[in-house]
Image: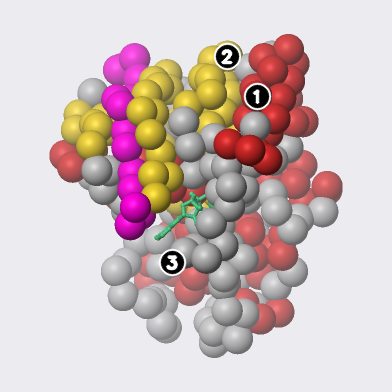
Amino acid sequence: MTAFAIEADNIHVRFGDYWALTEVSFAIPDGAFVAVLGPNGAGKSTLLKTCLGLIRPQSGLMRLYDRPLAEFDASRMGYVPQIKTLDRSFPALAIELAASGVLSAWPWHIQGALRRQAMEALEQVGADHLASRPLARLSGGELQRVYLARALIRRPPLVLLDEPATGIDPAGERDMFRVLERYQETEKATIMMITHDWHTAVHHATHILAINRRLIGCGESSPAFAEEMLREAFGHIGHEHPHREANA
Ligand SMILES: Nc1ncnc2c1ncn2[C@@H]1O[C@H](COP(=O)(O)OP(=O)(O)O)[C@@H](O)[C@H]1O
Ligand SMILES: [Mg+2]
């Protein structure tokens, strides 16, 4: 077993002439549940996508389980993207969305082993009853569960979630955490989750990582540390991060 699931060494990410991330370094122990905190535009999604290899940093190194990111098998990462952009009119069923976590093409008319695998993934997140429901008829919380099933279908040791609790009611959020915690326990997985929620950071996470274009801090979660990180991450937003609506 390696000591660190994710190591970021001096990561810089630029979009045009805008530096979204500068000098970001941290190390996430294997088996940690990390809450990523920071204001809007802080580069949280950018950081997650850099960990996933979807964004290549201008400089710096990302290592996963002691290997350069490029050598890491992408199928061993599960990803729940920030969802707001999903077009609900996309004519697909829940089971197809779950199964799309295994294939590179859209899995219309899934049968046999893939159907069983997708059903198991849906069962694992308590969403098997939704399998043949069109995406258009899922609530926010139900859709989020199906995305979670999609992320977990290959039983990845590393799961990255981008604001998965946004738009879910408190009961749905509690269910989601139960699923995640059970998954983490049985698979000994490492989980990195972007959230705005102090409660999540303190009660579910073992570690807190705060950024605002630069690293603010990364350490073991405690109420005092969470409070300090939130204050520092959000305290500077007005003057340190003028939002670039014009180029966004
Ligand atoms: N593909 C992109 N091209 C240009 N700018 C981007 C791109 N992705 C993100 N940005 C900008 O980088 C900054 C950080 O974005 P993001 O990582 O989405 O922040 P967060 O998730 O913390 O809200 C924002 O100012 C955003 O507009
Ligand atoms: Mg984001």
Q: Main secondary structure of the magenta part?
A: strand
Amino acid residing under circle 2: Glu
Q: In this view, does 85 lie to the left or right of 174?
A: left
Residue that carries the numbered disc 3 in the rendered image: 99
Q: Give the range drawn in magenta.
A: 1-17
Q: Where is residue 243 in the image (x, y as percent from the top left)?
A: 58, 52
Quadrant in which the N terminus is drawn: top left
Q: Quadrant of residue 169?
A: bottom right
Mark 3 Cβ and ligand 2 under 8 Å apart = no
Q: Position of residue 179 (x, y in %)?
A: 64, 42
Whether the magenta-drawn stretch holds residue 12 is answered as yes
- Regarding residue 98, the answer to whether it shows in the image is no
Amino acid residing under circle 1: Glu
Q: Quadrant of residue 158?
A: top left
Q: Position of residue 151 (x, y in %)?
A: 47, 53
Q: Is mark 2 on a helix, strand or loop?
A: strand
Disc 2 versus disc 1: nearer the observer: 1
Residue lying farthest front?
Answer: 239
Mark 2 or mark 1, earlier in chain: 2
Residue 148, above or below 221 = below
Q: Is residue 70 left or right of residue 135?
A: left
Q: What element carries label 1?
A: helix
Q: Which of 129 and 247 is in front in this view?
A: 247
Q: What element carries label 3?
A: helix
Disc 3 versus disc 2: nearer the observer: 2
Mark 3 or mark 2, earlier in chain: 3
Residue that carries the numbered disc 2 in the rendered image: 220
Any mark on residue 232, and which? Answer: 1
What's the distance in space between the residues labelled 3 and 2, CA to CA?
Answer: 35 Å
Q: Nearer the viewer, residue 28 or 119?
A: 28
Q: Which of 32 and 110 is in front in this view?
A: 32
